[in-house]
Amino acid sequence: MTKMDKETLVAEIVKLKTELNAVILAHYYQLPEIQDVADILGDSLALSRRAAKTEADIIVFCGVNFMAETAAIVSPDKKVLIPQKNVGCYLADTITVDKLLEFKKKHPRAEVICYVNTTAAIKAESDICCTSSNSIKVVNSISPEKEIIFIPDKNLCDYTSKETNRDLICFQGACDTHTDIKIYDIEKILKNHPKAKIMAHPECNSDVLEIADYVGSTTGMLKYAKSSLEKEFIVATEIGIIHQLKQDNPDKEFYPLEEAICPTMKLITLESLYRCLKEQKYEVKVDEAIAQKARGAIERMLEI
Ligand code: 13P
């Protein structure tokens, strides 16, 4: 492919997506230029909902594998494409089906809540899915007498346990991008910007969550920043969200944790998105037997 400039690439992407009746879904952790060309931007929950409802023939997912897989599961009649191969998620890889089955054996009567950051095979072995924006609602939807296994993120599990006042059996997985955010780094920013409010994603360690003024999903942070009268915010999540925060709030200042970069979220570029539409690759397919079981867990969440 001869190298195209950014403007031409964007124009070609828009042309191709219209010809193919494709919709581009992107997560807030994507590169700014991908966020700008997307039809729908959202957190994990919003993207799952939109993928389930779209009228398009093709869904192009700019995110990580588990997100594209979720789209393929909820929209089995659509073609789902992802612009790069092997866009993994460190957190999703912390749990295997064998480990989950072992957990279930120890707690045979427990309901299994799986964070959306899991593979389709893990969702297939779970009762209900959740995201960081609805984990509290999902736990509250389960009878108080029931034991609950919560996989795989230990920080989201502890946070949800505290907020719901329920004992949850937590798997000990974690997202390294979020757990690498240290209090010390936040305090360094606070020294120069003492009035800044701290927003943190529930995948962060508990000491970070304790000092945060707001804890929530990426969409939650966007809403908090927009509705707040404050002018300065420290953003304890993946750096990609800064783009949307600045677009929504040109009069406010956002201070990212510079090291909080999810390497796989950054693999998708305008070039790979263009190639994806042009060559209709890489298609994301989920084995139908697994998809059928996983669909139950996702649909149960979407009904809440
Ligand atoms: P959100 O659902 O808050 O967008 O989080 C997605 C994610 O993968 C966090 O690591």
Image: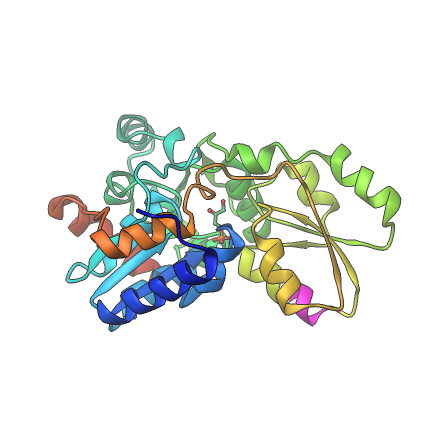
Q: Residue at x 21, y 52 (%)?
A: 279
From the viewer's side, name the closer residue of 208 and 192: 192
Q: Is residue 75 magenta?
A: no
Q: Is residue 218 left or right of residue 55?
A: right
Q: How many marks?
A: 0
User: Colour scheme of this structure image?
Assistant: rainbow
Residue projecting furthest to the front: 2
Can the viewer see residue 110 in this picture?
A: yes
Q: Residue at x 21, y 48 (%)?
A: 283
Which region is colored magenta? 224-228
Image location of residue 105, percent across then percent down: 28, 29
Predominant secondary structure, magenta span: helix
Q: Is residue 227 left or right of residue 169?
A: right
Identify whether 239 is placed above or below 206. below
From the viewer's side, name the closer residue of 258 and 225: 258
Q: Residue at x 56, y 50 (%)?
A: 240
Residue projecting furthest to the left: 289
Q: Is residue 226 magenta?
A: yes
Q: Is residue 141 left or right of residue 77?
A: right
User: Within the image, what quadrant is residue 58 found in?
Assistant: bottom left
Q: Is residue 281 left or right of residue 128?
A: left
Image location of residue 261, percent across then percent down: 56, 39
Q: Residue at x 18, y 47 (%)?
A: 285
Image location of residue 47, percent across then percent down: 39, 61
Can the viewer see residue 303 in this picture?
A: no
From the viewer's side, name the closer residue of 260 and 173: 260
